């Protein structure tokens, strides 16, 4: 919608709560609206205080009545949508997203039901945001390594033990990133850079390095439209 229309509808609203699913941030505005923010392929959403210094570059600024607020710097494919609460369930970009892996309702039992006996390769399944919202190609590398699974393993071939190991690996890797405030080139809400550096990766982006478990050389392979980094010994394609 036009900027003036957006500003007119947002002005005077109260931000009541913030949640996320996948790449989308949901800001509930009372009365009656949701502001949906997607930083796309990269960007910064940074808080400022009254009279505080603003970033050198940004495309969006929202101020609260106390003089604080936040700016957003989009780098690629970012967007902000304002959606009436009655239309949220029909919003085409968020309505069909799966659960976030760090959501309290993403339990081992839920994950087991989600996998079922699907006929799909595990990596492509997990990267599909309609199945699981929030796992990208960056983190999937170490998730599959920790679980001991080849990216091209068919879901239907997984044992219950392997599915449980995969669930634990998802939680371990993603929550470690949350703890460190994301990747080193990202910023959190308060402008602090993330602490998830290359040292944190076990096999991801480490072609030719020794596997931290067995010392076999890490390989980069093609899996569908993406590249994968694996230990051929620890992650055999069975």
Image (tube, rainbow, N blue to C red):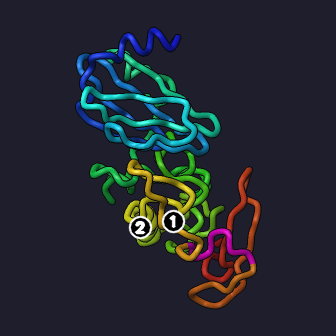
* Prevalent SS, magenta region: loop
Reading the chain from its start, which is encountered first: label 1 or label 2?
A: 1
Left or right of 234: which side holds 31?
left
The image shows residue 200 at horizontal and vertical percentages of 53, 74
Left or right of 188: which side holds 156?
right
Q: Classify residue 137 by image quadrant.
A: bottom right
Q: How many marks?
A: 2
Residue beneath the point at 23% across and 31% down:
16
- The answer to whether residue 69 shows anywhere in this view is yes
Q: Tell which of 204 and 185 is nearer to you.
A: 185
The image shows residue 159 at horizontal and vertical percentages of 47, 68
Report the magenta residues as a range.
201-207
Q: Which residue is mark 1?
A: 158
Q: Within 10 Å of the Cα at label 1, are there few (<14), some (14-19), or many (20+) other Cα atoms? A: some
Q: Classify residue 231 by image quadrant.
A: bottom right
Question: As drawn, which residue projects farthest toward the front?
Answer: 51
- The answer to whether residue 160 shows anywhere in this view is no
Q: Tell which of 188 and 80 is nearer to you.
A: 188
The image shows residue 63 at horizontal and vertical percentages of 35, 28
Q: Tell which of 187 and 113 is nearer to you.
A: 187
Q: Nearer the viewer, mark 1 or mark 2?
A: 2
Residue beneath the point at 62% across and 34% down:
77
SS assignment at label 1:
loop
Q: Within 10 Å of the Cα at label 2, are there few (<14), some (14-19), or many (20+) other Cα atoms? A: some
The image shows residue 25 at horizontal and vertical percentages of 41, 37
Q: Which residue is mark 2?
A: 176
Asked if the residues shown at circle 1 and circle 2 are in contact, with their CB atoms under 8 angstroms apart, the answer is: no
Residue 206 colored magenta? yes
SS assignment at label 2:
helix
Quadrant where the C terminus lies? bottom right
């Amino acid at each position: 919608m036009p900027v003036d229309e957006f500003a007119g509808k947002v002005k005077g609203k109260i931000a009541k709560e913030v949640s996320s699913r996948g790449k989308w941030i949901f800001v509930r505005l009372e009365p009656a609206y949701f502001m949906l923010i997607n930083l796309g392929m990269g960007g910064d959403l940074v808080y400022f205080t009254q009279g505080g210094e603003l970033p050198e570059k940004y495309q969006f600024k929202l101020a609260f009545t106390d003089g604080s607020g936040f700016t957003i710097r989009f780098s690629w494919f970012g967007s902000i949508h304002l959606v009436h609460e009655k239309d949220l369930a029909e919003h085409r970009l968020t309505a069909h997203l799966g659960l976030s892996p760090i959501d309290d309702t993403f339990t081992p039992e839920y994950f087991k039901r989600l996998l079922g006996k699907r006929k799909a390769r595990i990596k492509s399944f997990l990267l599909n945001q309609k199945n699981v919202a929030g796992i990208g190609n960056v983190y999937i590398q170490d998730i599959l390594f920790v679980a001991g699974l080849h990216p091209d393993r068919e879901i239907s071939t997984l044992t219950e033990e392997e599915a449980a190991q995969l669930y634990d690996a998802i939680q371990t890797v993603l929550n470690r990133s949350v703890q460190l405030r994301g990747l080193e080139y990202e910023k959190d809400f308060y402008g602090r850079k993330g602490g998830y550096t290359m040292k944190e990766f076990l096999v991801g982006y480490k072609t030719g390095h020794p596997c931290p478990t067995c010392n076999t050389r890490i390989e980069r392979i093609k899996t569908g439209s993406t590249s994968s980094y694996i230990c051929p010994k620890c992650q055999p394609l069975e």
